[in-house]
Image: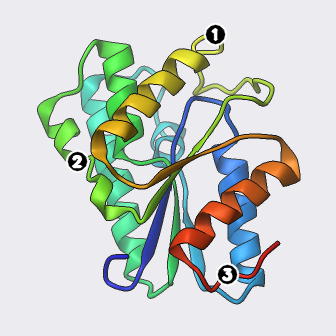
Amino acid sequence: MRDGVCKVAIVGPESCGKTTLAETLLKHLQAAGISAQLVPEYARAYYAARPYQPTPADVLAIARGQLDAERHAAASGVRCLLCDSTALTCRIWAEVAFGRAEPALAMLHRPQDYALTLLPLPDIPWAPDPLRTHSDGREMLLARYRAALAATGSSWREIAGEGPARVTAAWQALRQVLPDLPKI
């Protein structure tokens, strides 16, 4: 926890249920009386106003926008932030799309800022989306996330299953950093 805010990162391959998991966890946290806020994936807002033709500069801007949104949400005084994507997502995306991440982008990933990182597995059906481009590359992306997270030494948990099983697994992981959470 940093400044009394428990930041939880939710990262992973495209279409692995990150947003759905984040939204569901938010509802459960609030129902349990925990002040929590969701920091949405900034790339969606970024590309809502421009064509989806990413450049390395766009990916850097998205990472910076994601971090600005996290800082703004943390200043609201909530106890828990659920971050749907992080600078790590941008770094991996840049490596896959452009062969490397710019040094400025790589420096934005600060795993120590998160009490926990959840890595949902791509064990749910693919759902098409205009910002998704790797329908056949989810396992490759998962391997990149695993390697990146293992290299940081930070606390992370893989989240498998569908529906309630997935939420229960994530909730159990959350209880490691928020031990006063009730069981669900």
Q: CA distance from mark 3 to mark 2?
A: 30 Å
User: Which amino acid lies under the numbered mark 3 shown in the image of this protein?
Assistant: Leu
Dot 2 surroundings within 10 Å: few (below 14), some, or many (20 or more)? some
In percent of width and height, residue 16 lies at: 67, 34
The numbered mark, 3 or 1, whose residue comes first in the sequence reads 1
Q: Is residue 112 left or right of residue 125?
A: left
Snapshot quadrant of residue 137: top right
User: Which amino acid lies under the numbered mark 2 shown in the image of this protein?
Assistant: Leu
Any mark on residue 184, and which?
none
Number of marks present in the image shown? 3
What residue does disc 1 label?
A: 136
In percent of width and height, residue 69 lies at: 40, 63
The numbered mark, 2 or 1, whose residue comes first in the sequence reads 2
Residue at 64%, 45% in the rendered image: 18
Q: Can the viewer see residue 62 in this picture?
A: yes
Q: CA distance from mark 3 to mark 1?
A: 37 Å
The numbered mark, 3 or 2, whose residue comes first in the sequence reads 2
Residue at 39%, 65% in the rendered image: 70
What residue does disc 2 label?
A: 108
Residue lying farthest right?
164
Q: Can the viewer see residue 133 in this picture?
A: no
Helix, strand or loop under label 1: loop
Residue at 17%, 44% in the rendered image: 107
Residue at 55%, 70% in the rendered image: 176
What residue does disc 3 label?
A: 181
User: Which amino acid lies under the numbered mark 1 shown in the image of this protein?
Assistant: Asp
Q: In front here: 23 or 168?
A: 168
In percent of width and height, residue 2 lies at: 32, 77
Rendered image coloring scheme:
rainbow
Dot 3 surroundings within 10 Å: few (below 14), some, or many (20 or more)? some
Q: Is residue 130 left or right of residue 54?
A: right
